[in-house]
Amino acid sequence: MNYLENRKYVIQAIFLAVGVVYALRLFYIQVVDSSYKQAAETNAIKTVIQYPFRGLIYDRNGDLLVQNTPVYDLMIVPKEARNIDTLRLAQMLDIPLEDARERFKKARAYSWVKPSIFQQMLSTQDFAHIQDNLIDFPGFYINARTARGYPHQSLGHALGYIAEISPKQLEDTSYQGYRPGDYIGKAGIEMAYEKYLMGKRGVKYKMVNVRGIDKGSFKDGAYDTLSIAGQNMVSTIDLDLQAYGEHLMNGAKGSVVAIEPKTGEILAYISAPFYDPNLFTGKDYGKNYMELLQDPDKTMFNRPIMADQNPPGSIFKLTQALIALEEGVINPRTTYACNKSLVNCHPHPSPLDLYGAVQHSCNPWFFQAYKALINQGKSKNTFTDTSLGLKDWREHVLTFGFGKKLGIDISGEKSGIIASTDLYDRVYGKNRWKYSTIYSLSIGQGELGVTPLQMANFMAIIANKGYYVTPHLIRSIGDDGKPLAENYERHYTSVKPHHYEPIIEGMAEVVRAGTARRANLEKVGIVVCGKTGTAQNPQGPDHAVFVAFAPKDDPKIAIAVYVEHGKWGGQSAAPIAGLMIEKYLTDTVTMKLQEKWVLSREYLNIKSK
């Protein structure tokens, strides 16, 4: 009996001891030790992406073309966003109520627990307007990043823009490492050099309590990684020349491309009408993009590299003459009469040799020279002979960069059109076409199409007497300023250097006393070599073309001006080129009458003679 009584007391003592231990432990946890209280309050880890500074872009003289500006993304975690006053939120963000509701749905569809962007690219002013109200919207927080900014309004088509990565791109393995909400180059330099400009993303882990209040770094930042800024770049563009060219082309449609002949560096890249690149920054980016995309003037159309359907006109006569010289079917003193029964022409002296034919752009002269080139008597059958001649001619033409992509360092370049035997065989049948079918090629019409970039590159070829360097927009990458070797590769034509001399002499006469006197800069000591052209346009007024390089003996700039509906190259395109050449070579403009004429836009309403 005593044994049982003792066992009862032992059991009671054990229970009492356990109770005392628990009581003391609870007292310690609740009163003495605060770590558990802190752990309860800091029961969540928030991942904050540290977006890197995107690489800056400078012009060739060190002027800033593209910078970074602070913006703020409003993020949402749907699981935490409960009992939200959607109407008040929409009013605060100045968006339609339906848009706000749609964004809630999109966020939930992406993830209930992962953050996603609710409103992107808020400006500093927008952020200041909403930050004090965010406490009333649980599940919402601000994530700072940088966006592109432009201290000027030039070069939109070449620079391109950045935008949020698309779902389709995220599915593409070549975009591995990007996440929803990331920004990526979508066009121009921003897209072509994305891997250099983007930098490397960092991550910061923060402890937050149940109310989302920041409680500091997790593990004192032991797992945080720093972002790495993208590499800066130096462009080949001369910003002053670019801005002046856009000033001259404002109100017109067309292109201007200027190249440094020896290096292939693009000095100016103008697609008119142009747009302010700042339109692609900020929260109104989407709206601005759609307005430009639907613009009837095709503002988003990148004319210097995409407009390849228009014939080059008379500037292509220089190509024909060079090939004919190389083939030995003409020489600089070869003379032809201006026989208008062959093809129409404007009044000028006759007969002419090669120098005079280039100066006066004689259509019948080039008709006859091209016939001598195509029909060399390689076959007694005139149809076969023409086919053989055209095939050899085309091989020469391709070496000038026509009919193929030159390889400029932005995407979207078109190759142009160069007539071929296959084309005519499909249209007319094999051995059923001859020179009378294709003679329009002799004067740059017919089945020909070249881009303005190819036109400017053609001038670089003549300036260099037989070669060109791949045209490009980026000079160097990174702080050490290393150029990309592929951007400076030389390409040689099939025509020997000495054959360019008579062409250059004739081009100098075009500007001195021919159809391009409005580009004459002899008063400031600069000899300009050029060629005018008129490209026929079945849909309306003809297009005006002028190509040139200067100075004659030491070329530093090659340029092509293409004015849609400008009618005559000498009146509309030539003065624009002359003004830009003077601006680049002398850093001033003395041809004030020419400038006044161009800025009056009268050339866009030239009456037919």
Image (spheres, rainbow, N blue to C red):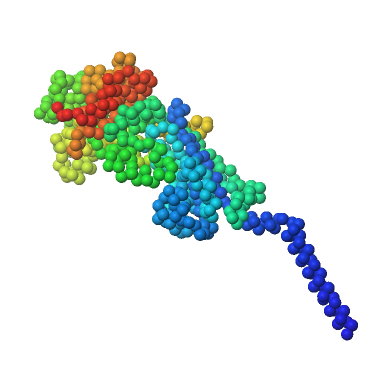
Q: Nearer the viewer, residue 171 or 414?
A: 171
| Residue 67 placement, left or right of 412 | right
| Residue 62 placement, left or right of 367 | right
Q: Nearer the viewer, residue 344 or 247?
A: 247
Q: Residue furthest left?
A: 341
Residue 597 sits above or below residue 55 on the image: above
Image point (71%, 55%), residue name: 35
| Residue 137 placement, left or right of 239 | right
Q: Residue furthest right?
A: 2
Image point (74%, 63%), residue name: 26
**Residue 122 in picture, x, y percent from top left:** 47, 44
Image point (19%, 39%), residue name: 539
All told, the count of numbered labels is 0
| Residue 257 placement, left or right of 545 | right
Q: Is residue 574 visible?
A: no
Image point (59%, 45%), residue name: 225
